[in-house]
Amino acid sequence: MTSSHTMQYIGLLLLAAILLQTIAVAVTFIYFSNVLTTMKETFSKSSVSCLMRANLRTIKGLDTGSTEGKDDPCWQVTQQLHFLIEKSMSNRYQKEISSAIKDQDAPPRPKIAAHVTGSYIPEADKDGRGPSNRKVLGQKIQSWESEKGLAFLQNVQLSDGELVVPQPGLYYIYSQTYFRHTLTEEEENEEEDEGAGEDTIRGRPMLQYVYKKVGSYPVPILLMKNARTTCWSRDAEYGLYSIYQAGLFQLGAGDRVFVTVSNVSTIDMDEKSSFFGAFLVS
């Protein structure tokens, strides 16, 4: 009996000890959980207050240069934030100023453009068929005006009816020719003899070509071509027609551009009717 009572007593002591230990662990866990929650809330509130500049009694009431203000954690956070913002803005302004200075130091881009207009050909020169070249189609127009009236040259040369560009780039080239087509006495007699002038003399096409010449190629290169067919009343003394064409082309330094037509003698070289030009795009 005595031994049985002793064993029961020891079992109760062990049970009580385990129960007390369990209660102690639970209380400790609850305590530290509350402490961590309180610390998180305090830290969160302090961070938000620093960023929102709310409830900053210490910072507002203290001199920014005082030792007490510098020891405040919120003051340190805001000062670091201000420092980062100032540094970022300073770097940005320095880049913008450097870019502006580079743009000012860069030499201005030269303006390259030309617009030449028709110049009336002496009657003695109009009697012939004009200059021709076996390497190109048609007859080259050489009598362009480059200074008077609407014509001008800006960093472009005009030589032998050809525009010479000074630097490589993408150029817009345009040309218009105004045809005043008439029948000579010989053609009128031929028309009366054949009786089919609509299909022969009056039906001849008018052509305009734009060429470029490069130093590395012996033959001029055709850039543009346009055509119209003459057809006017038998009772009319002449027919009036115009051909215009334009386009973007890559040219090199020293390249030459010129215009040819099917018959130079039929061109009305008024400055507002026949003209030719080019300008640098990029």
Image: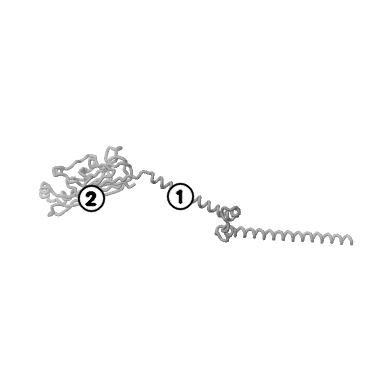
Q: Find residue 259 and report its horizontal and vertical position in percent.
A: 24, 44
User: Vertically, is 194 above or below 217?
Assistant: below
Q: Is residue 6 visible?
A: yes
Q: Find residue 268 and report its horizontal and vertical position in percent.
A: 18, 49
**Pointer 1 local density, CA inside 10 Å: few below 14, some 14–19, many at least 20:** few
Query: For the residue marked with disc 1, what is the amino acid?
Result: Tyr
Q: Find residue 21 and report its horizontal and vertical position in percent.
A: 76, 59
Sequence order check, earlier mark of 1 and 2: 1
User: Vertically, is 105 above or below 30?
Assistant: above
Q: Find residue 76 and report its horizontal and vertical position in percent.
A: 58, 53
Q: CA distance from mark 1 to mark 2?
A: 55 Å
**Point 14% across, 54% down: residue:** 233
**Point 15% across, 44% down: residue:** 122
Q: Is residue 139 visible?
A: no
* Quadrant position of the N terminus in the picture: bottom right
Foreground residue among 79 and 21: 79
Q: Which residue is mark 1?
A: 93
Foreground residue among 126 and 234: 126
Q: Which residue is mark 2?
A: 243
User: Vertically, is 218 above or below 79?
Assistant: above
For discs 1 and 2, the disc positioned in front in the rendered view: 1
Query: For the residue marked with disc 2, what is the amino acid?
Result: Ile
**Point 83% across, 59% down: residue:** 10
**Label annotation for residue 265:** none
Q: Quadrant of residue 9?
A: bottom right
